[in-house]
Image (tube, grey):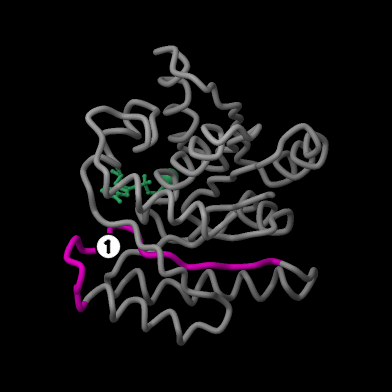
Amino acid sequence: MILTVGNTKGGVGKTTLALNIAIARALAGRDVWLIDGDRQGTAQTAISIRLESGHLPGIACAQYSDGATLRSQVQQQLTKFDDIIIDAGGRDSTALRAALVLSDVLLIPFQPRSYDVWALNDIALLVDEVRSVRDGLRAYAVLNCADPGESSSDNAEAAAAVADVPQFEYLDTPIRRRKIFANAAGQGLSVLEINPKDKKASEELNSLVKALF
Ligand SMILES: Nc1ncnc2c1ncn2[C@@H]1O[C@H](COP(=O)(O)OP(=O)(O)O)[C@@H](O)[C@H]1O
Ligand SMILES: [Mg+2]
């Protein structure tokens, strides 16, 4: 399956989720290719740190910030991998558009804040464009950095706002704001691997991966 983690807004957790999902799938025995479609190369850097510290499984990773190259590389290497996870960068870019045209699923992380909710319309228009040229792109919005409280009104309001965006389905598997996500990613690890573990973070990630695949 080709999964793009994308949102034209920056800082919503695209790289964090792409890295965690890619590693979770690799831990489940899948051949995974993580593509960093962002010029900033954060996902690629995290994977380099992972390789340097000898963490297994190793994750194949490449960086293509140019849409045409991303598209041709993915088309060529498609059959070599079970799952391709694309971290698409934080702007409307050729890489993001190429990724969307190739993908089975778009995962849109957003935070329970007004600016993030307003910005969903921007990526919704891109989804419309992709669907006008090809069928079959499934788009799911998921809360990231959700408020830790189980009954947060901000989380609930943000979730309700997604219901007004017909292009997406809301995935009720929020990832809450937990320091372990930042700590693990800094070492090129998923929250499933870092020690000591945070059981809740692992459960949240596993629920998200299960909902997606
Ligand atoms: N669930 C989370 N809990 C805590 N910190 C998070 C979480 N998700 C992302 N972050 C932090 O938020 C910042 C932005 O995340 P990042 O994945 O780089 O976003 P993007 O790729 O969309 O720009 C990073 O410092 C990251 O460590
Ligand atoms: Mg990023």
| Location of residue 33 by image quarter | top right
Q: In the image, which residues are magenta?
A: 137-153
Helix, strand or loop at label 1? It is: loop
Asked whether 156 or 49 is in front, the reply is 156
Q: Which residue is mark 1?
A: 146
User: Is residue 55 toward the left or the right of residue 198 in the image?
Assistant: right
- Horizontal and vertical percent for residue 78? 78, 39
Residue at point 42% right, 71% down?
A: 119
Residue at point 55% right, 84% down?
A: 166
- Horizontal and vertical percent for residue 67? 68, 47
Q: Quadrant of the C terminus?
A: bottom right
| Residue 139 falls inside the magenta stretch | yes
Asked whether 53 or 99 is in front, the reply is 53
- Horizontal and vertical percent for residue 135? 78, 71
**Residue furthest toward the left?**
149
| Location of residue 72 by image quarter | top right
User: Is residue 149 toward the left or the right of residue 114 in the image?
Assistant: left
24 to 162, vertically: above or below: above
Q: Is mark 1 within 8 Å of ligand 1?
A: yes
Residue at point 73% right, 58% down?
A: 101
